[in-house]
Amino acid sequence: MPRFRVGARVRAAVFDPDGHIRLPRYVRGHCGQIIDDHGIWPLPDAALRGSPRSEPVYAVRFAARDLWGQGSHAVVVDLWESYLQEAPGPPGAPGPREPPGQREAPGRQEAP
């Protein structure tokens, strides 16, 4: 069952794992709004790490001014659920950007 609903305010996670992931750096830590639920799809990052799984994918709209400091348009990015966190405030409200940091990638586990 999807964790978020259309209209929910979310924040893109902030982490910098080794290797490629499908979470663009330019949205990490920024708040956006879910505008569509695309259903459940395989998470490519997890498959590459040998632990394939599927999870909900959402279309998330970010204000260009929040991402780049200017622009009156919106940027829509399709993101897997594990890349998202709940964000406080009403939909469309600007949110503080979370500072960059090192976090573990979703679904990634260190070898014992």
Image: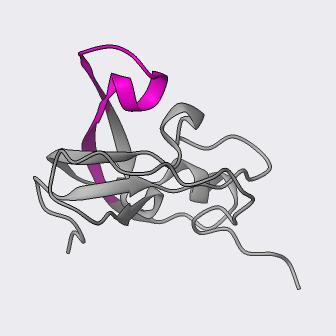
Q: Is residue 92 visible?
A: yes
Where residue 3 appears, as percent x and y from the top left, is: 24, 71
102 sits left or right of 12 in the view:
right
Is residue 65 highlighted in magenta?
Answer: yes
Which image quadrant is residue 104 in?
Answer: bottom right
Report if residue 42 is visible in the image: no
Above or below residue 84? Residue 51 is: below
Left or right of 13 on screen, residue 61: left
Residue depicted at 48% across the width and 38% down the height: 27
Residue at left 20%, top 75%? 1
Quadrant of the rendering where the C terminus is positioned:
bottom right
Query: Could you tell whether 42 is left or right of 36 in the image?
Result: right
- Closest to the observer: 62 or 46? 62
Residue closest to the eye, 82 or 97:
97
Instruction: Judge whether 109 appears above or below 25 on screen.
Output: below
Magenta part of the chain: 56-76
Count every numbered label the image shows and give the total: 0
Q: How is the image coloured?
A: one colour
| Residue at image point 59% right, 69% down | 107
Could you tell me which residue is drawn at 85 percent across and 78 percent down? 111
